[in-house]
Image (cartoon, rainbow, N blue to C red):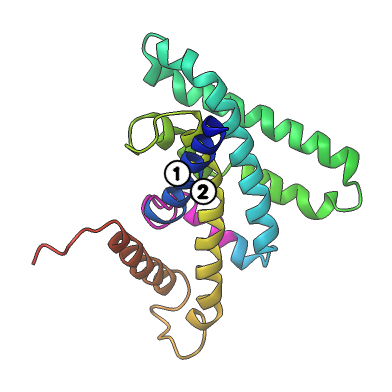
């Protein structure tokens, strides 16, 4: 029972770290272009976030089981990206098969979201960040799985925060020179500084 509680407490801690301190959008800029494309095309934000979170979580579970073998391999840092891309590819195919069989009516709506989610650099980034020593708190399978879950949830949170202001950032009140992409990037930069402050860094002056 204690091992079970330790597993989920570590998983929960790494989930929070991935959501806020290591948010793939605000600290790494992974997947920013996908969010902007999704907002322009008016895709369902939370459905996209749900699919991306599921793919990231399933990929992280597979990675957690395979990582002990990958970690022992010679030149593991060269093999990791390829192996993780293969894992994501398998999850992508299985997701399409599952949806085609059990969600036939919703398939036309969710198919493009599955494509965008699976091939989003935030998914691969989450796997690499959790297993290459970039996040010191991750030391076990629970950490890898928690970080994968948190990365998906953090991506959804970031997408929501950007979508809230998207219409206002494209309003007539914004000067033409800044309207659209430039002001959106400035807004993301301000949010990134706010999230960066959560880590505890101070300004150098």
In magenta segment, residue 23:
yes
Q: Name the quarter where the N terminus is drawn.
A: top right
In magenta segment, residue 115:
no
SS state under label 2: helix
Q: Which residue is mark 1?
A: 14
Measured along the vertical axis of the image, is residue 168 above or below residue 120? below
> Which residue is depicted at the point 44% across and 55% down?
25
User: Magenta stretch mostly in which secondary structure?
Assistant: loop
Pick out the residue farthest to the top: 74
Residue 37 placement (x, y as % from top left):
58, 60
Left or right: residue 145 versus residue 118 is left
Residue 193 placement (x, y as % from top left):
30, 65
Q: How many marks?
A: 2
Query: Of the residues tagged 2 and 1, which is closer to the observer?
Result: 1
Q: Which residues are magenta?
A: 22-37
> Which residue is depicted at the point 51% across and 48% down?
150
- Residue 110 visible? The answer is yes
Q: Which residue is mark 2?
A: 150
Pick out the residue farthest to the front: 1
Give 159 or 39, whichever is nearer the viewer.
159
Within 10 Å of the Cα at label 1, are there few (<14), some (14-19), or many (20+) other Cα atoms? many
């Amino acid at each position: 029972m204690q091992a079970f509680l330790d597993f989920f407490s570590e998983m929960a801690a790494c989930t929070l770290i991935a959501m806020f301190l290591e948010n793939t959008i605000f600290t790494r800029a992974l997947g920013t272009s996908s969010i902007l494309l999704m907002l322009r095309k008016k895709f369902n934000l939370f459905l996209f976030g749900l699919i991306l979170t599921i793919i990231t979580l399933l990929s992280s579970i597979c990675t957690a089981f395979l990582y002990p073998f990958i970690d022992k391999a010679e030149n593991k840092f060269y093999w990791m990206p390829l192996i993780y891309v293969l894992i994501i590819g398998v999850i992508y195919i299985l997701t399409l098969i599952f949806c085609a069989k059990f969600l036939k009516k919703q398939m036309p709506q969710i198919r493009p979201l599955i494509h965008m989610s699976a091939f989003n650099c935030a998914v691969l980034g989450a796997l690499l960040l959790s297993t290459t020593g970039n996040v010191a708190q991750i030391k076990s399978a629970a950490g890898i799985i928690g970080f994968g879950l948190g990365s998906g949830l953090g991506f959804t949170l970031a997408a929501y925060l950007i979508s809230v202001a998207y219409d206002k950032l494209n309003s007539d009140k914004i000067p033409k020179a800044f309207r659209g992409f430039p002001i959106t990037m400035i807004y993301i930069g301000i949010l990134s500084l706010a999230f960066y402050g959560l880590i505890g860094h101070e300004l150098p002056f």
